[in-house]
Image (cartoon, grey):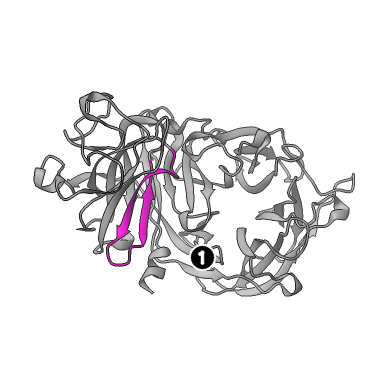
Amino acid sequence: MRRNILLCLVVVLAAFMLGRAAVADEPVMLPYIDGPWWQVAGNPDLGEYTTDRQQPVDFAVWQAADGTWQLWSCIRKTACGGNTRLLAGWEADSITDSDWKSTGIRWMAEPKYGETPGGMQAPHVVQHNDQYHMLYGDWENICLATSKDGKNFERYVRPNGTTGLFSEGLGTNTRDIVALEHDGKWYGYYTAYPNRQGAVYCRTSDDLKHWSESTNVAFGGAAGVDPFAAECPHVVRKHGRFYLLRTQDYGISSRTSIYSSTDPLNFGLNQDRLYLVGEMPVAAPELVIDHQGQDYIAALNPKLDGVRIAKLGWTLPPKQGELVFDFESPEQRGNWQVTEGNLPAVFTQSSRSGFAAPMTHFIGTAELEGGSFDDDLTGVIESPAFRVEAPWHIAKLSGGSDSRRLYCELIDEETGGRLARFSPAVDSNTMQNHVLNTSAFVGQTVRLRVVDKGTGGWGHINFGGLYQGVVVEPSGE
């Protein structure tokens, strides 16, 4: 039971970097999970289309005209044929209810309108001109359906007899749209992978039917450029800024990057240093902003067997507080150990690069005596067990940005379960502050691991220490 609870805990990772002042007209706020998750949807019975491999994935949450809450999710790996995807639904009286009632299959592809068989993907629902508008993907295009009650939708069919509104091109898998109204226009954010490189695009519209040409608004950086490096983009406006959430990994190792900007058409093209503000270990998040004065976050279960919801909070970045480990103490350094790999030592005093380490000693997995280095060294370094005493912590981190092979993680001492995982944001040896929300496991005993499974250029990670974080409350709020 304890392990299951820990798997549902979310830790927010935020990386604040040099140069952010260049785009920060308003202070950046950190989103964080403000309390426990509750499950709202499971793996549905799809009748003849049910399989033992099916998985609920990208979804939408909204409130219908009668006040009920609706959730429609893409279910993949079903027996519906084609690309195996359809949309299933759930309903509840309140967003805080658990175990919403299944409403069955809600939407399937219609090839007669040009939709790809089994190609239903990621719906998103907004209200416009007294109607509900559902934007969805058909594998190649973004399409539209409308509804008066927010529960029963009809396709918008274009004069040419198809439902496709726009696409980044055949074979680019244009999908996962979210719409945000701002200054009298709708901004539609979605992903596609021209040239097999995933990016976030945006188009604008006055009526959700006719759209502008596309703009590439987010690409590359630590999230990568593979076809699935910009999944499920979700954009909200909060505290005077725009926040883009962009998923890279699903399942137990779920990872979503968070970008912030004052320009809704620019979240950075390989510019993490200016726009990336953090990560969340969740997949396909959807935010509900200001429902009765409270924000919420919905996300996939780690095992891809349903959807869960939690309250969402926002805070200013914490300031650096007390040191957790004193690397200048020989006794404390002696309690760290290499548990895997061929690393020659735990600590280094290397000055071969501009590490900007806060102490003379730090962990650098490529560093050798005499000022040389070897990026092909790999291994795992583990801290002594320690008790989490503060709801926020700041880690000093740098190195390569390959988050699948280079990372730190907090491990629960009792269960061995992973509580948090965080990585360098850019390829750089200069240590940056990474802020972790550890409020969900204050009082627990944990260990910190520094993991290097990378080889070749930038195949190393540097860790300069861990500090307690001190939160400063926003003034005037």
Q: Which residue is mark 1?
A: 308
Farthest-out residue, front: 342
In the depicted structure, whether residue 295 falls above or below residue 217: below
Residue 373: image location, x then y, percent: 30, 28
Residue 365: image location, x then y, percent: 30, 37
Q: How many marks?
A: 1
Is-magenta flag for residue 408? yes
Could you say which is closer to the camera, residue 394 or residue 223?
A: 223
Please state if 236 lies on the left or on the right of 45 as rendered. Answer: left
Q: Which residue corresponds to the image point at 47% horizontal and 40% vertical from the top-left?
A: 259
Residue type beneath disc 1? Arg
Report crowding for label 1: few under 14, some 14 to 19, many 20 or more residues within 10 A (C-alpha): many
Q: Secondary structure at mark 1?
A: strand
Q: Which residue corresponds to the image point at 52% horizontal and 64% vertical from the top-left?
A: 303
Residue 109: image location, x then y, percent: 79, 58
Q: Quadrant of the N terminus?
A: bottom left
In the depicted structure, whether residue 286 falls above or below residue 211: below
Q: Is residue 366 visible?
A: yes
In the depicted structure, whether residue 227 falls above or below residue 288: above
Q: Is residue 61 visible?
A: no
In the depicted structure, whether residue 24 falls above or below residue 437: above
Quadrant of the rendered structure where residue 389 is? bottom left
Residue 433: image location, x then y, percent: 31, 39
Please state if 453 lies on the left or on the right of 66 as rendered. Answer: left
Could you say which is closer to the camera, residue 301 or residue 209?
A: 301
Q: Which residue corresponds to the image point at 70% horizontal and 40% vertical from the top-left?
A: 172
Please state if 70 lies on the left or on the right of 415 as rendered. Answer: right
Q: Which residues are magenta?
A: 402-423
Could you say which is closer to the camera, residue 444 or residue 92?
A: 444
Is-magenta flag for residue 329? no
